[in-house]
Amino acid sequence: MGRFATTAALYEDLRPPYPPEFFRSVARKIALTERSALIDLGTGPGLLALGFAPYVGRIVGVDPEPNMLDAARRAAARAGRHLSLIESKAEMLPADIGSFDVVTIGRALHWMEREPALVLFDRLVAPQGAIAVCASFSISDGRNPWLDDYNAVRRSWSPSRLWEEAGRGERTHRDLPAFFRDSAFHVADVIKIETRHEISLRDLARRVLTFSSSSPEALGDHVEAMLRDVEERLAPFSRDGVITETLLSVAEIVRR
């Protein structure tokens, strides 16, 4: 069982969402059309793949976790979209898969070895194509006053080894220029979209379960105790059981 197997049922509904304006802005910047082909690496339940679906003609999602692919398959059916799915690590994709106008990656780049990933991108990205490294997360500039407590309680319940791995992943996303240094690629544009929404205290607590460092598999018998702890810590920031969250959705556009 992969480390995200037990998060699949929760991931789609509880991770910070990408707003429609995010997909419109990225599609416009990359000049996607109905003739464009997109491959989404580490597709999970297909959040990025299906979000970009209205702007492209062909979509392929890749993920090594069968439970995530099942979730993506169900989401595509609900959306009435055709989504080709491949169970594989990105680095193991067959050589004859072809090239794509855009390669999208959510929070998956840090699971990939740098050198094999650069070789992979070189063969996947069409000559005039692009890579879009995407993330949506709670803004940490003080507009989410509950966030420090939230991260503190997440860390307190996460095995230290897994929390350290998660931290390395965050650093990978923050330092893409270093990741692509001395390669054929460079960061050409950054698109940022801010949104606000309301989320129930219960759902915000359950979001903790979507991270590999605090998944149901990692927490074992402590899931319910962790959920109670998170809700108690965040209760002072809620109103009628609801918390306002300010989100930042980011796409770093990488080109040759």
Image: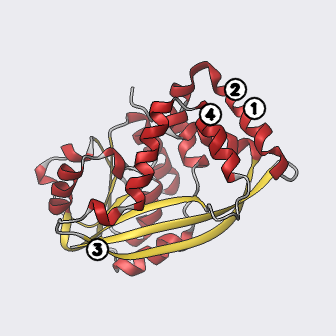
Disc 4 designates what residue? 156
- Mark 1 and 2 residues: CB-CB less than 8 Å, in contact? yes
For this rendering, which residue is in front, 42 or 73? 42
Q: Which of marks 4 and 3 is nearer the N terminus?
A: 3
Q: How crowded is mark 1: few (under 14 residues within 10 Å), some or many (20 or more)?
A: few
Q: Which colour scheme is used?
A: secondary structure
- Mark 3 and 2 residues: CB-CB less than 8 Å, in contact? no
Residue at coordinates 21% horizontally, 60% vertically from top-left?
A: 121
Q: Which of marks 3 and 1 is nearer the N terminus?
A: 3
Q: Where is residue 192 in the image (x, y as percent from the top left)?
A: 51, 73
Q: Residues within 10 Å of mark 4 (few under 14, many from 20)?
A: few
Disc 1 designates what residue? 228
What separation in Å lies between label 3 and label 2 (alpha carbons)?
48 Å
- Say if 147 sits above or below 188 in the image: above
- Say if 39 sits above or below 102 in the image: above
| Tag 3: amino acid | Arg
- Mark 4 and 3 residues: CB-CB less than 8 Å, in contact? no
| Tag 4: amino acid | Ser
Residue at coordinates 48% horizontally, 44% vertically from top-left?
A: 74
| Tag 1: amino acid | Arg
Q: Is residue 2 left or right of residue 51?
A: left
- Say if 180 sits above or below 214 in the image: below
Residue 224's tag is 2
Query: Image quadrant of residue 142?
Result: bottom right
* Residue at disc 4, secondary structure: helix
